[in-house]
Amino acid sequence: MPNTLDHSYLSKSVWKPDLFKGKVAFVTGGAGTICRVQTEALVLLGANAVILGRNVEKTEKAAKEIESLRPGAKVLGLGNVDVRKIQSLKEAVDTTVEKLGRIDYVIAGAAGNFLADFNHLSSNAFKTVIDIDLLGSFNTVKVCFDQLRKNKGSVIFVSATLHYTGLPFQVHVSAAKAGVDALMNALAIELGPLGIRSNCIAPGLIGGTEDMGARLNPPTEIPLENKIPVGRIGTTKDIADSTVYLFSDAASYVTGTIQVVDGGLWQVGGMLGELYPSIVKIQNEDPESKL
């Protein structure tokens, strides 16, 4: 996947060049669309970064592409890192500090998701998503804590809006992201006195991302994008700008918040449209259940 931002982001952006000069970002899920564009924006504005992922080749390739956005940028791609295993993350932090010198910003964005009705969602599948999204977010901040404390850093958790109204087929990720929101809120209060800020970004429908398929954009009679109050699907730049704001000094008095970037969609509700409740009944009445 190529970069979604380029040098025009600097000329057309409200942000000043070198805004994050001398800063280092530590990003889990950095080879995925959302976390990658967050990293791209930070690097274009002067930061160096490390992106983490499970797939070695994909993560290293993404790092090289992001690094090419700015002359002199340093972007490490560390693959074979499992956020569920804290020692794996600890080694990544040690490598980051050794090669880049510090960590100022943390993006906890590693996530797992799939469509599954409750009837066919196994306990193991539920636990896997909780472990990646929630435990993985905790582990990420835990291993970065010393650097965050030393540099009075900031954390952004990548959350979602799925659990605001309840969404069928997303029980697992809704529970996980609700936990992420609570984790963020508690850390904002507990770590605030140390100079560490903590916030969430909750993306809605963002064009060109993994969630633009059937997972969060079901084939309803009225396309979901037609229900978005601001009249358009989100862009990766929308996510980039929200990230820059929350890490910048403009948000120095902002902590414990959830920055929803969805054009107002979650407040409209009814994501399944006319498919509800018939499709839910069909799936959950199936006698072939999973434990």
Image (spheres, rainbow, N blue to C red):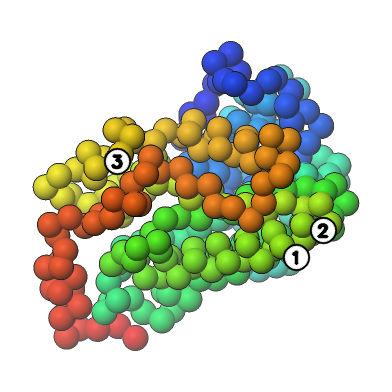
Q: Amino acid at mark 2?
A: Pro
Element carrying mark 3: loop
Q: CA distance from mark 2 to mark 1?
A: 7 Å
Mark 3 closeness class: few <14, some 14–19, many ≥20 residues within 10 Å: many
Residue 93: x %, y % from top left: 77, 54
Mark 2 = which residue? 193
- Relative height, residue 60 to residue 67 (above, below): below
Left or right of 262? Residue 226 is left
Q: Residue at x 54, y 52 (%)?
A: 258
- Relative height, residue 176 to residue 55 (above, below): below
Element carrying mark 1: helix
Residue 51: x %, y % from top left: 64, 45
Q: CA distance from mark 2 to mark 3?
A: 38 Å
Residue 190: x %, y % from top left: 75, 65
- Relative height, residue 261 to residue 22 (above, below): below
Inspect this view and state whether residue 238 appears: yes
Q: Residue at x 31, y 64 (%)?
A: 167
Q: Amino acid at mark 3?
A: Ile
Mark 1 = which residue? 190
Q: Residue at x 56, y 38 (%)?
A: 242
Mark 3 = which residue? 228
Element carrying mark 2: helix
Q: CA distance from mark 3 to mark 1?
A: 36 Å
Q: Residue at x 70, y 20 (%)?
A: 17
Mark 1 closeness class: few <14, some 14–19, many ≥20 residues within 10 Å: few
Q: Are marks 2 and 1 in contact (CB under 8 Å)?
A: yes
Q: Are marks 3 and 1 in contact (CB under 8 Å)?
A: no
Residue 149: x %, y % from top left: 84, 55
Q: Earlier in the sequence, mark 3 or mark 1?
A: 1
